[in-house]
């Protein structure tokens, strides 16, 4: 992590979970890292964060997932972790509210390679891009107070795997 203008590295050894697939990272206001990791041992994604007393680990308790792949992490304005991940042929969203994980199925795609990426805008709206493998399209979604809204961004050929998303200061995706 980065502190006082100096980068340091650490190896985090976790014996109780089998890590696999993807790692996503976000930094909080103190430049402390938060990580989400897919897991191949069933039972949900893994969330880790570095606090002043060391690394903390939590499991996202999603028993509907055998293998969690391609997890993407973002912190909202209250620094709550949001993780969007592939669970079979569905896209799941988990948010931790200081007490427990709230988990929802965002969309079922019919395909098992979704590759999501997420970010927040200045209004704390969650944005996601992902690959629709059935139609081979790049899709975009936003979670507003009205729920999830989706649209196809690109459909020419096979597009959208390993997408990346960002929102600028003017709210443009």
Image: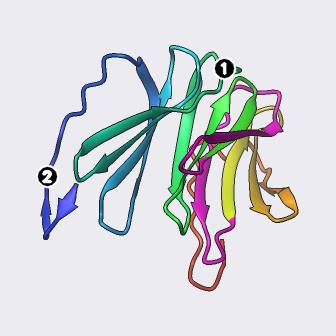
Q: Is residue 159 visible?
A: no
Mark number, residue 8: 2
Badge number at residue 36: none
Q: In this view, does 24 lie above or below 146?
A: above
Please give the name of the residue rendered at 74% of the width and 56% of the height, measured from the top-left corner. Answer: 140
- Please report the residue visible at 57 percent of the width from the left and 83 percent of the height from the top: 169
In screen coordinates, is 18 left or right of 148? Answer: left
Front residue of 92 and 140: 92
Asked if the magenta segment contains residue 105, the reply would be yes
Q: Relative to 34, is 133 on the left or the right?
A: right
What secondary structure is found at the residue carrying circle 1? Answer: loop
Residue 120 among those drawn in magenta: yes
Mark 1 lies on residue:
63
Foreground pick, 13 / 99? 99
| Residue density around tag 1, few if under 14, some if 14–19, many if 20 or more, within 10 Å | few
Region rendered in magenta: 96-125
Q: Which residue is drawn at 23% across and 53% down?
A: 52
Query: Sequence order check: which comes first, mark 2 or mark 1?
Result: 2
Residue 155 shows in the view:
yes
Residue 95 picture location, percent across and down: 62, 47
* Residue 62 x %, y %: 65, 26
Q: Where is residue 124 in the image (x, y as percent from the top left)?
A: 64, 70
Secondary structure of the residue carrying tag 2 is loop
In the image, 84 versus 132, the foreground residue is 84
User: Which residue is most to the bottom?
Assistant: 170
Residue 99 or residue 150, whichever sits in front: 99
Q: State which quarter of the image contains the N terminus.
A: bottom left
Residue drawn at 29 percent across, 51 percent down: 51
Q: CA–CA distance between discs 2 and 1?
A: 35 Å
Query: Left or right: where does residue 158 sit relative to residue 80?
Result: right
């Amino acid at each position: 992590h980065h502190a006082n203008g100096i980068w340091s590295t650490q190896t985090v050894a976790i014996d109780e979970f089998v890590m696999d697939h993807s790692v996503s990272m976000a930094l909080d206001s103190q430049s402390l890292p938060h990580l989400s990791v897919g897991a191949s041992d069933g039972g949900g994604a893994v969330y880790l964060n570095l606090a002043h007393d060391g690394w903390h680990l939590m499991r996202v308790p999603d028993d509907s997932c055998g293998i969690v792949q391609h997890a993407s992490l973002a912190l909202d304005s209250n620094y709550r972790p949001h993780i969007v991940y592939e669970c079979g042929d569905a896209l799941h969203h988990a948010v931790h509210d200081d007490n427990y994980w709230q988990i929802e199925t965002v969309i079922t795609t019919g395909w098992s390679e979704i590759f999501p990426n997420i970010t927040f805008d200045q209004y704390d709206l969650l944005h996601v891009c992902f690959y629709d493998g059935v139609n081979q399209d790049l899709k975009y979604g936003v979670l507003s107070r009205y729920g999830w809204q989706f649209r196809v961004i690109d459909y020419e050929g096979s597009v959208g795997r390993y997408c990346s998303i960002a929102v600028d200061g003017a709210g443009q995706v």
